[in-house]
Image (cartoon, rainbow, N blue to C red):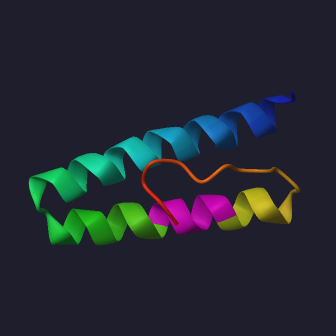
Amino acid sequence: MDAFTAGILQRIRNTESDLIRARESGDDFLVDVEQAELDDLRRLAAEYGVEVEVGAAGA
């Protein structure tokens, strides 16, 4: 696995965790921010052919 793939997958995992915490805390604004970040990271991964499993944060 190259550095780009490892880095993007780690960023996705971190953002999924942040999204879960935002949902649990009831912070709707932060949920929107984290979801947008996650969507962007997944789109970037797809553009470069990096396969991403949908985590606990969902789609």
Q: Residue at x 48, y 62 (%)?
A: 37
Q: Residue at x 24, y 46 (%)?
A: 21
Pick the quarter of the image with the N terminus.
top right
Q: Residue at x 11, y 61 (%)?
A: 26
Query: Quarter-wise, where is residue 46 in the image?
Result: bottom right
In the image, the segment drawn in magenta is 37-42
Q: Viewer-proximal residue, 55 or 42?
A: 55
Residue 8 sits above or below residue 27 on the image = above
Q: Position of residue 6 (x, y in %)?
A: 73, 32
- Residue 3 located left or right of residue 9: right
- Residue 5 located left or right of residue 18: right
Residue 39 drawn in magenta: yes
> Count the marks: how many?
0
| Dominant SS type (magenta) | helix
Residue 59 sits above or below residue 49 on the image = below
Q: Position of residue 33 (x, y in %)?
A: 34, 67
- Residue 23 located left or right of residue 15: left
Q: Position of residue 7 (x, y in %)?
A: 67, 35
Q: Residue furthest left?
A: 26
Q: Residue at x 88, y 56 (%)?
A: 49
